Amino acid sequence: MLDREVEVGRMTQAEADKCKKAGFPKLKESEQATGLGGQKGYLVETAKKYVLKQTEISPEQLALGGYRIYTTFDKLKVAAMEKAVNKTKKEFLDAKARPETDKFVQFGSASVDVNTGAIVALYGGDGWDKKHFTNNADTSGVPVGSTWKPYVLAAAMQHGTYKTAPTGLSPLSKYNANDLIVIRDQNGNPIPGKNGQPFRQKNESDKAYGYVTLREAMEKSINTPFVQLGMDVGHEHVAQMAKDTGILEQTMDQNNASFYLGTSTPSAIRMADSYATFAASGKHYEPYSVKKVLHKGQRVPGFEKPTAKRAMDPEVADNVTDVLKNVIESDEGTGQKAQKLGRPAAGKTGTTDKNKSAWFVGYTPQLSTAVTLFRTDPESRKLLSMNGTGGVPSIHGGDIPAEVWTNYMIDALKGEEIEDFPTAIPIGEKADGTGAPSPTPSATPSQTPSSTPSATPSQTPSKTPSPSVTPSQTKSCDPFDWACDDNGQNGGNGNAGTDVGGTDTGGTDTGGTDTGGTTDGGTTTDGGTTDGTTTEGETDGKPGNGNSNGGLFGGGG
């Protein structure tokens, strides 16, 4: 370069030699130079992406500066979430001792205010300063497993089955919970498997449960009742229920039996926000991360206060909560580790095919939080099995994710009044065995299932997960300042295991587009800058507008 400067006459040879002798200053990593290390980079990027989605401001205009962005992030809650993840990582992972199982393990988490939809905290990864530029709270291609089952139950209570409609189904209705039962359509005919034989659904355990209530099936996360229930309710009702609570349609898997067991891939942000709908007695607020934007002192339109939408009847939501409380409170519940929270809470575990991802999504009357754990190959971006990770045979949602969730929620709710959920009023018709050909379940299947069963699910969905989108790495010109105030983001059927819903597909290190939101309400949090644009926060979250099409910023409505 210096020789070229001499060649074109911009420098003398003596000047070039002097520069060579002095040497060049060491380049700083751009993420370090902007002060966006740790979680700050994910927070700023989340807010910036939402601003771009909500307005006609271009990235180039934003880069020119002059914008002041007020976020919803709560400094103390962000710190609590990072602390909870780091504590578990330190105790659980040892990539040096177990490189074949503990390397490439990723955590992602998001926390949403139940009464507003404001994103108050997220954990996006190790940090931009650690060269992790994708946001794990905005996951793409990581199936949610059995955390999907509440949508099946909610749809059944809201719409009923083909035998009970328009009367909803009671959660005390009984379904066949035995392993490898034949799944039937609404005409009573067996659903064909890949080999042409009747499809049989796999549980994690081969235990002969017999007929159990849907409440007990949720508590123990038994697969077979929810697959048959989903067929009886209908795919369209289940999918619409999930969509009404904020799950994006483009993240949903195809119409097959495994759909009811969680082969869809919403982000942690979307799952936390969706479960907040149950906590809010069926009212849904779109998630948002920005409450106000000023440009040269003038308020930018596009961040008006939104109104909640009714996703389901209050009685349905409260009954879902009552069932999910039992998942935690029961000594046989898969989420019992969350009992350490010491206050009323509801939640659901999720574990997917070949142990490739594990989830815990839960909530109190104030706060809804989702935690995901997965491994990805850095080259192919495909999900890797977590069997053996942490030195244990397999990871379930009720293990590490539930531990992170509990530790975070203890700190995040410190000082908050202990509240309970509304009392669930008994609803629906007790329609035992809908979809089953006889009241006497067979404990021993007579045919080989369509795909080889295993202790964990083995279904490979035919739909490729949405591609990973690496967040923009446009740099801020000032550090992210937490102290800033208001003056200064369908193919075939498959088997699954417990908590599962199996998918064999590649996940990604994240990516999607599920980030921030809009308008008034937030948290006393971060000020900082994004390309010359100050990003700030305050306290008191209130609702904001939503987003869609692949995430909070994908467009659409």
Image (spheres, helix red, strand yellow):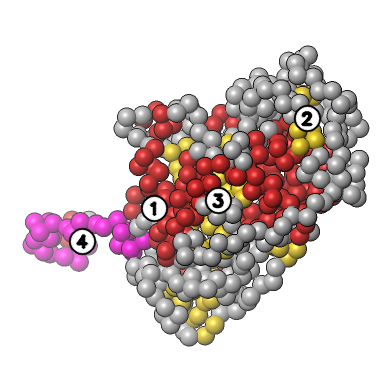
**Few, some or many residues within 10 Å of mark 1 (<14, 14–19, 20+):** some
**Residue type of the residue flagged with mark 4:** Glu
Residue found 45% across the figure and 80% down from its top: 486
Would you place residue 17 above or below residue 339 in this image?
below
Residue found 45% across the figure and 28% down from its top: 392
Query: CB of mark 1 within 8 Å of CB of mark 2?
Result: no
Would you place residue 126 above or below residue 475 in this image?
above
Q: Which residue is mark 1?
A: 83
Mark sitting earlier along the chain (1/3): 1
Q: Is residue 42 visible?
A: no
| Residue nearest the observer in this picture, 441 or 374 | 441
Q: CA distance from mark 1 to mark 2?
A: 43 Å
Depth-wise, is mark 3 or mark 2 nearer the camera? 2
Q: Position of residue 409 (x, y in %)?
A: 49, 55
Q: Position of residue 239 (x, y in %)?
A: 75, 48
Mark sitting earlier along the chain (4/1): 4
Q: Position of residue 174 (x, y in %)?
A: 80, 35
Start-end of magenta stretch: 8-36
Mark sitting earlier along the chain (1/2): 1
Q: Which residue is mark 2?
A: 211
Q: Quadrant of the image for the C terminus?
A: bottom right
**Residue type of the residue flagged with mark 3:** Ala
Q: Which residue is mark 4?
A: 5
